[in-house]
Structures are given as C-alpha cells and as structure tokens.
Image (cartoon, helix red, strand yellow):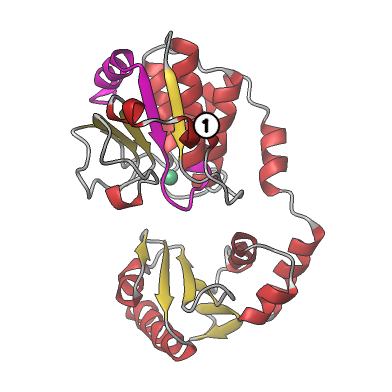
Amino acid sequence: MFNNSQILLKKIKEYKNIIISKHVSPDWDTQGSAYGLREIILDNFEDKNVFVVGEVLNKGLREIDETKLTKEIINNAILITVDVANFERVDFEFKDEVKEIFKIDHHLEVDNFAENKIVDDSAIACTQVVTLWASELNLIISKEAATFLYFGLITDSGRFLFEKTNGQTFLAAKLLIESGVNITEIYSSLFLKNLELAIWYNKAFSIAEFKNNNSIAIIKVDEDVFKNIDLGEEEIKSALSVLSGIKEIKIWLMAYKTPFNEKIKVSIRSRDFDINSVAINYNGGGHKLASGAKINNWDELNSLVKDLEILVNKK
Ligand SMILES: [Mn+2]
C-alpha cells in the first residue's frame, strides 16, 4: 500500500541504533508517532536501541534519551523523522551527523531532506501512516503503542471531524482499538478541562469582537491576562475553539501578547477560506484552514483583519 514499506522494514533491520525525532513545539501527533513507533520497533525486532529525541509535549523538558546518545551512536544511527515536513523543524541538535535519514510524514512534500520516505499527504495524521504501515507488515502493535498512536489520530483529526478524515483514518482507529486502547481514558486525559480553563473559555467568548457582519471574530489577549491567570500559553490559546462551529463566523482568530515575547502571535482558523494566503504575508503560515502569524503591534492586527475581510467578501 505504501511505496516504501519494505524499505523502512529493511532499514530498521539494518540498524542497531535508531533515533526518532519529532518536530519543534511538539503536538500529540508527532509525539504519539515517535513513542508508538519506538514501541513497535522494540516489540518486533530484537536487539535494537531506540532513542526518542526532542522536546517533551507540555513539559518544557527534553527527552531523557538525548542524554544517552554519544557521537559514536549518532554517527552510526538512522534518524527517523515523524510528522515533520521541513528539515529545519526537525527537533534534534545532531540531525546533520547521523548516517542516514528516513522520513515518515503526512504533510505536503516540500523539503526533500530524506532519500527514503513514506509520505502520505492524504492521511489526517502521521500516526495513521505509522499504524497502517505496521499493520501492512503484520507487525505487533501492543496496547501501549496503540495508545500513543491513538492520541495522535484523535487530536490531528479533531476527533474525526476534520476534512481529511477518511476510510483509512477509521481503518487505523479500528486497528488501534482492537489492539486494546481504552478510548474513554484517552478522551478524559485529552479533553476534560479544569474549572479555571472553563472560566477562561467563558471570558474569552465574552471579550470576542465581531466584524464584517459577524463573519470574522477576534479574541485579543494582552499581557495582563497571562499575568493574572494560572494557565500556560497553549491553554490560553486553546480558547480560540470557543469561536469554532458557529455558522455566521467564517474566520476566527486569537491575537495574543505573552510577557515573554515582543511580538504578538496570531492563530487563525476557518472552515472554508484559505486563510494561509493571508497569514504568509504576516510572518506566518501553516495549513489552508489553520494558520498562524506574528505581528509587531496591534495596528498591524487591523491590517491583517482587513485582509481577511477582503478574503471573505471576495466569495
Ligand atoms: Mn500531524
């Protein structure tokens, strides 16, 4: 099914030392792919050293495996990158010093940094690619591996809501559930929020501004919010979701200034407008329907919003 399934198998057999790296600012898809693949390799192949490197999601720490690496190991290892399109986003200091690189990904192929790869840009998640690859080769997927992989599948697909969710996504979900994942536990750990976060979501909705006949909605967050609430940047940012799923709102965004950064970061979302085409003009970019930007001041936000209005009104 995938072009290079056998090559990846061959490479794993060939190398004793395997390093798996995530993308910078990890999410569950890259981390679930990395941990899931590590478990699959350890469960199916004898005598392998597998090192997962990079930042640990939500912990602000580096993976402990990084401390176990020596120059000798790195020089003789294969590096498998998961969920990373661009080489510069591979979160590994010594990525230039490994023997070879294999890429597993689901983003558009824009940076040909690995000679061998499995890239399926129709997949909603990288963990979908890892799961279907393992299944194709009849590899054992333990409950532990499946749990890591399911985390990525469920988050990148927005609980099977996003556009690219397809039959292959549900096939991967079926395989993982049959491997024993406890979906209730996973949903609780991902989606149960504490009261403070719920209160912030409520506040975020109440300060939203609506423009262009309600087709554009903006939540502006200044430094004071960060100083007065005991929530991290990711949690504060996640309140953007309170504006999703509302018929009138075609584009919704959050612009926020943290006390630790000079710039104002902007997260932009839409169901059907190519907001990325605007974001790239404001020091940003991402996906067609989910993108980000970085601006210098609140005046620039007005100009960004104007551009979004033009985008909406064009249709
Ligand atoms: Mn992903």
Q: Measured along the vertical axis of the image, is residue 136 above or below residue 236?
A: above
Q: Residue 29, image x and y in percent?
A: 48, 41
In the rendered image, residue 98, in percent from the top left (x then y), is placed at 27, 33
**Residue for point 46% across, 69% down:** 268
**Residue 33 x/y as whole percent:** 46, 34
Tell me which corner region of the image, top left, top right, bottom left or bottom right, holds residue 241. bottom right
Q: Quadrant of the C terminus?
A: bottom left
Q: Amino acid at mark 1?
A: Leu
The residue that disc 1 covers is 149
| In this rendering, position of residue 140 left or right of residue 210 | left
The residue stretch that appears in magenta: 1-29
Judge by depth and name the residue closer to the eye, 43 or 154: 43
Q: Residue furthest right?
A: 195
Answer whether residue 301 is visible to the viewer in this image.
yes
Mark 1 lies on a secondary structure that is helix
Residue at (60, 69) in percent of width and height: 243
The front one of 15 and 277 is 15
The residue that appears at 78% across and 68% down in the rendered structure is: 199
47 sits to left or right of 160: left
Q: Quadrant of the N terminus?
A: top left
